[in-house]
Image: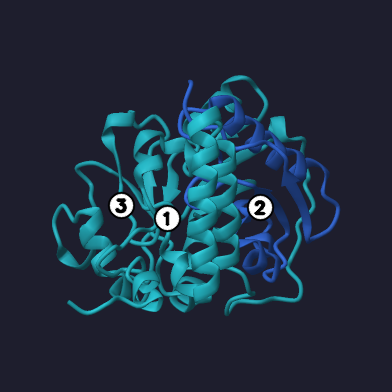
Chain colours: A cyan, B blue
């Protein structure tokens, strides 16, 4: 049996033998930081055994996820367009787009022609997804919870399975519309798989998405990158 | 989106704060929540709504591009 190096160990969480979307960031940390992450995590678990306080564990994971995704990435812009709001929000019509990977059951987009693709299969095909033009999936805002599916090869979907509102807040926006906080919440809401070709998203998909929203008289848009 | 007259706000976890800051988004609410759960923990309806209200406040009150609100609420799973 050959010994595993720390480098092999950390890489295994990134679509490897220990693939884990919550901890795939370990691959991008120097070995010493991986060792610190684990040692500190175990120490804090010891404290949590005694006081039951999970906050330190959550904070620890958040802090190291942030270290793992540090750096500006490939897409930097020095400025952006800005539209001034014309109406109070209780007169505005809002839409939602999330990169969460939700879809209505029975209308599975079947990526790459694969029927009923599993989360595991999506993770296994991540390199195919990131070359793909994203497909905007329409989701009526009255879709019952048990009729909504979620699959995304880039993040751990278990929280979104437990409650879609963690990254696709259609129930909360329905409530805000019913309470009169916002004028309207437009149906359908939209989701797509954010692990996609960013170039194709910008050049090909986005102009069509804007046309769609304009045709639906959307004035305000909540965007949730996951 | 903004060029076409649609007012936008982004809600994102601060895990990606370096990358998102470098995009100079028109309006951003950044939450201290783990990756994959930018609105808060499952079933934490109150926190999810507070995050959305924070985003709507930016829609209503931001006067220039690049305004960021760092949402102060803590991620609190369970007990709902």
Secondary structure category for the residue under label 1: loop
Q: Nearer the viewer, residue A156 or A107?
A: A156
With respect to residue A224, does A30 lie above or below?
below
Q: CA distance from mark 2 to mark 1?
A: 28 Å
Residue at numbered disc 1: A22
Residue drawn at (37%, 53%) of the image: A101
Q: CA distance from mark 3 to mark 1?
A: 15 Å
User: Label 1: few (<14), some or many (≥20) within 10 Å?
Assistant: some
Query: Where residue A24 sits in the image (x, y, percent)?
Result: 41, 64
Instruction: Report whether mark 2 lies on the same chain as mark 1.
Output: no
Residue at numbered disc 3: A151
With respect to residue A138, does A72 lie above or below?
below
Secondary structure category for the residue under label 2: strand
Residue A138, visible in the rendered structure: yes
Q: Chain of mark 2?
A: B
- Left or right side of B3 for A205: left
Residue drawn at (34%, 39%) of the image: A161
Question: Mark 3 or mark 2, which is nearer to you?
Answer: 3
Residue at numbered disc 2: B8
Quadrant, the N terminus of chain A: bottom left
Residue drawn at (82%, 49%) of the image: B62
């Amino acid at each position: 049996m050959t010994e595993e190096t720390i480098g092999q160990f950390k890489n295994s969480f990134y679509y490897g033998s220990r693939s884990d979307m919550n901890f795939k960031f370990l691959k991008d940390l120097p070995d010493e930081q991986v060792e610190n992450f684990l040692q500190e995590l175990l120490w804090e678990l010891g404290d949590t055994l005694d006081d039951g306080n999970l906050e330190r564990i959550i904070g620890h994971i958040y802090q190291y996820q942030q270290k793992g995704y540090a750096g500006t990435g490939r897409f930097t812009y020095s400025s952006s367009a800005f539209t001034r709001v014309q109406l109070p929000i209780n007169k505005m019509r809002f839409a939602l787009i999330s990169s969460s990977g939700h879809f209505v059951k029975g209308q599975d987009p079947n990526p790459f022609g694969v029927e009923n693709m599993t989360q595991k299969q999506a993770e296994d095909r991540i390199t195919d997804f990131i070359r793909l033009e994203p497909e905007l999936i329409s989701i009526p805002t009255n879709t019952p919870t048990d009729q909504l599916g979620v699959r995304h090869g880039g993040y751990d979907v278990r929280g979104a399975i437990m409650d879609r509102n963690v990254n696709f807040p259609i129930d909360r926006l329905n409530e805000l519309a019913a309470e009169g906080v916002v004028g309207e919440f437009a149906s359908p809401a939209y989701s797509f798989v954010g692990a996609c070709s960013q170039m194709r998203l910008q050049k090909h998909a986005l102009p069509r998405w804007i046309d769609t929203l304009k045709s639906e008289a959307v004035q305000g848009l909540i965007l949730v990158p996951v | 989106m903004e060029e076409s007259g649609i007012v936008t706000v982004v809600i994102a976890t601060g895990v990606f704060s370096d990358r998102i800051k470098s995009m100079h988004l028109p309006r951003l609410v950044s939450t201290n929540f783990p990756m994959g759960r930018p609105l808060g923990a499952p079933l934490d309806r109150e926190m999810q709504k507070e995050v959305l209200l924070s985003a709507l406040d930016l829609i209503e009150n931001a006067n220039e591009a690049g305004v960021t609100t760092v949402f102060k609420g803590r991620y609190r799973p369970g007990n709902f």
